[in-house]
Amino acid sequence: MIRATHELHTRRKGRNLGLGLILLAFVGIVFGMTIVKVGNGEDVLGTGMVSKEASQ
Amino acid sequence: MSDASLHSIARGTEPELRDYFALLKPRVMSLVVFTALVGLLVAPVPVHPFIAFVSILFIAIGGGASGALNMWWDADIDRIMRRTRKRPIPAGRVSEGEALGLGLALSGLSVMMLALSANFVAAALLAFTIFFYVVIYTMWLKRWTPQNIVIGGAAGAFPPMIGWAVATGGVSVESVLMFALIFIWTPPHFWSLALFMKSDYDDAGVPMLTVTHGHESTRRHILGYTVLLAACSLGLAATSIGGPVYLLTAAVLNFRFLVGAWKVWNRTTEQAEADAYGEEKRFFKLSLWYLFLHFSALLADATLRAFGVIGGGA
């Protein structure tokens, strides 16, 4: 069973925090990209669907 | 990562985040970022700043991924060579399996994300760069031919081409010439270093031109490539991304580089040893400035063009 107080968790704290921050940054990047692409009216997913403003 | 990690714990060498970062060869990444950024910024098509940032980031991660895969494959020779002995795998901080996993995962991620942020051409070029560096160079040619540096240089030459493709979605004479500039610059840059560095490559069984063909042949090669490089560099001045700053920079740098290569070619190993390889060291140092200033000049002309100080180019 994994105990929260295990010495391994203390030792890996820096690494886990760093990885957490990287994952958060990745989420931010994907979110930002989506906002920019949709804002520009681009066909983000290659589905052929673009915003009404862009198609006009 | 569990098995390997448990072993490393037993040895008391817990890998830290910076060990994984070191697998990505951060110094090489900085060159990738710089040249890819210039390729992107000098292109005639404007890119949204956030898309530009994200694209450069994933080009850098793709470059880093190929560095990790290179360290995974070359772990055996990295243990032998002094220069590479402190890398994460030979130092025992990261296992080979972890490097392989990280390299593969980041390769896939970077290509996929570049396709989403920019376009499929840029993503395909990045995928090819990783494939070329890892499979063609690292696995196949590095230990087989003394021309390994020439071929390996191609991998390092792709970033400005990818940056250009991010903006334009294609390949053109400008991006091919930027590629050629780095590609042809790499051999004289690296061979001049090999002339004055007591090479570990010999012990590791990697054929280097200085060892397989001797110093005289290497000096000849340096001069030959430098002449070719000057032609390529001045050719770039005649394209749409060339301008007065680039032309002046290229003229001065190529003149100095050619004089340097001539001096390196025109002396024997005895003469070089007598002045502790002074000329070779000067040539090597100049080669670092050569590439940096060429790309900086391209950027300067693009900036002048953006502000309407100079015209639209050829």
Image (cartoon, coloured by chain):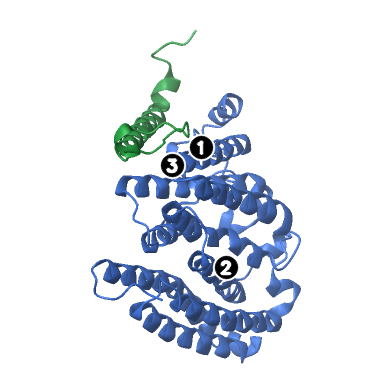
Chain colours: A green, B blue
User: Could you say where residue A19 lies in the image, as x and y percent from the top left?
Assistant: 40, 31
Label 2 sits on residue: B183
Q: Chain of mark 1?
A: B
User: Could you say where residue B170 lies in the image, as x and y percent from the top left?
Assistant: 50, 56
Q: Amino acid at mark 3?
A: Arg
Query: Which residue is the extreme one toward the top?
Result: A1
Q: Nearer the viewer, mark 1 or mark 3?
A: 1
| Vertical side of B69 occupied by B151: above or below | below
Label 1 sits on residue: B109
Q: Amino acid at mark 2?
A: Phe
Q: Quadrant of the C terminus of chain B?
A: bottom left
Q: Amino acid at mark 1?
A: Leu
Mark 1 or 3, nearer chain start: 3
| Vertical side of B206 occupied by A26: above or below | above
Q: CA distance from mark 2 to mark 1?
A: 26 Å
Is residue B221 visible to the viewer in this orientation of the structure?
yes
| Vertical side of A21 occupied by A5: above or below | above
User: Could you say where residue B27 lies in the image, as x and y percent from the top left?
Assistant: 45, 56
User: Could you say where residue B167 lies in the image, as x and y percent from the top left?
Assistant: 41, 54
Q: Residue at x 74, y 64 (%)?
A: B145
Q: CA distance from mark 1 to mark 3?
A: 20 Å
Q: Chain of mark 3?
A: B
Label 3 sits on residue: B18
- Place residue B249 in its image quadrant: bottom left
Would you call the spot at circle 1 few (<14 residues within 10 Å), some (14-19), or many (20 or more)?
A: some
Q: Classify residue B24 as left or right of residue B137.
A: left
